[in-house]
Image: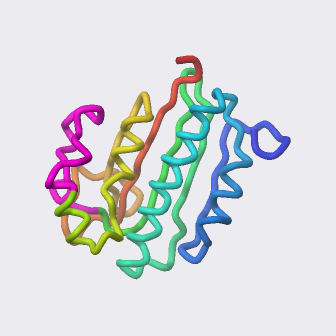
Amino acid sequence: MYKTEVYRNLIFNISEKAPLNAILKYLNLVNSGIPAEKQENIIYSTMELVNNSLRAQRETGSHEKPVKLRFSAEDDYLLIVVKDCGGGFETSLLPYDMNTPARDVDLESTAFQRYRERYSYNRFGMGLLTARQMADLFTLEFHRKGKVMNGYQKGRTEGTIVTMGIKWYA
């Protein structure tokens, strides 16, 4: 539900100039029907992903396309998809291995500290990790010209697609 209307799909096109507090205001109008404590985690994780996407697009100068945020009501899941045109990134630069289960990642590790220092504490490495911890289903993909690519390819990847699936009844 958005405001007072019920939808199976909601799509937000978010300009890189949109202030984060305005985005949060609109996200708080989305009521998934999932219990309130989990709904807060969904909004937080979604904001982290949107913020990452907006930053990537600003840093790469990809001004022509908005970040797309889609909420879809599927049979078993609420699907949340964030798609950007920020050029993608090399997952090996994250302060943890994406193949490590999210619950096993040590947030106090020296890798996290080095990551934060490398980016002058403007990045904390938490967006994807938070989404992975909260979601029942999670995928990270890269795209070029509307098609999903087989992994990140420097200079060829147009952007990222992050999908979170949250079970309706967990």
Membership of 103 in magenta stretch: yes
Seen in the picture, residue 64 relative to 11 is either above or below; the reply is below
Residue 164 found in image quarter: top left
Seen in the picture, residue 121 relative to 96 is either above or below; the reply is below
| Residue farthest toward the front in the current orientation of the protein | 108
Seen in the picture, residue 39 relative to 77 is either above or below; the reply is below
Magenta-drawn stretch, dominant element (helix, strand or loop): loop
State left or right for residue 141 relative to residue 12: left
| Residue farthest toward the top in the current orientation of the protein | 169
**Residue lying at 47% horizontally and 68% vertically, measured from the top left:** 54
Membership of 129 in magenta stretch: no
Seen in the picture, residue 77 relative to 114 is either above or below; the reply is above
Residue 136 found in image quarter: top left
Q: What range of the chain is rendered magenta? A: 89-112
Q: Quadrant of the N terminus?
A: top right
Horizontal and vertical percent for residue 76? 55, 21
Residue 22 found in image quarter: bottom right
Horizontal and vertical percent for residue 53? 43, 63
Horizontal and vertical percent for residue 93? 18, 59
167 or 75, which lies in front? Answer: 167
Horizontal and vertical percent for residue 113? 20, 59
State left or right for residue 58 relative to residue 117: right
**Residue lying at 53% horizontally and 48% vertically, measured from the top left:** 44
**Residue lying at 56% horizontally and 53% vertically, measured from the top left:** 69
State left or right for residue 75 relative to residue 101: right
